[in-house]
Image (cartoon, rainbow, N blue to C red):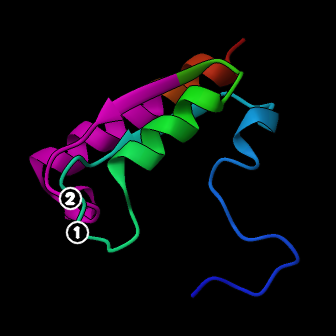
Amino acid sequence: MIPDTPVTYSPFLCAPFVQASAMFMVAPDDEMVHADYDVARQAFDLVPTDKRWHDIADGHFGLLHHPSERFEEASALQAEFLLAKLSR
């Protein structure tokens, strides 16, 4: 549910103001109703900071199944990204 706000929610409103590094791990075949791949890509393109995009297979929740190849892929990429950003 989208909460009542004075301005209609848009994923593009905040993206240009992000100040932290960002990693977008996006499932091209996401099973979530409002998880739109093209919208995620447009928001990613608006983020002005250091950022990384990664397509992940198996939908929105596929990477959560542990142990699994997809979980290992997702957690390794996230750890690598965080270590690179936090060790500066």
Tell me whether the residue at label 1 lies in contact with that at label 2, contact meaning CB atoms closer than 8 angstroms.
Answer: yes
Mark identifier at residue 7: none
| Disc with the residue nearer the chain's start (1 vs 2) | 1
The relative height of residue 23 versus residue 13 in the rendered view (above or below) is above
Q: Is residue 33 magenta?
A: no
Calculate the distance from the C-alpha at mark 1 to the C-alpha at mark 2: 6 Å
Q: Which quarter shows the C terminus? A: top right
Residue type, mark 1 in image: Glu
Residue drawn where x is 67% and y is 27% of the image: 21
Measured as percent of width and height from the top left, residue 6 is found at 88, 77
Q: Is residue 8 above or below residue 80?
A: below
**Image coordinates for residue 10, horizontal then vertical, percent:** 65, 59
Query: Which residue is labeled 1 in the image?
Result: 31
Q: Which residue is at 30% across, 42% downward?
A: 74
User: Front-most of 4 and 32?
Assistant: 4
Q: Secondary structure at mark 1?
A: loop
Q: Which residue is rendered at x = 64% and y = 21% of the image? A: 85
**Residue located beneath label 2 in the image:** 59
Is residue 11 toward the left or the right of residue 27 in the image?
right
Magenta-colored span: 52-79
How many other residues sit within 10 Å of disc 2, few (<14), some (14-19) or many (≥20)?
some
Write down the quadrant of residue 60 in the picture: bottom left
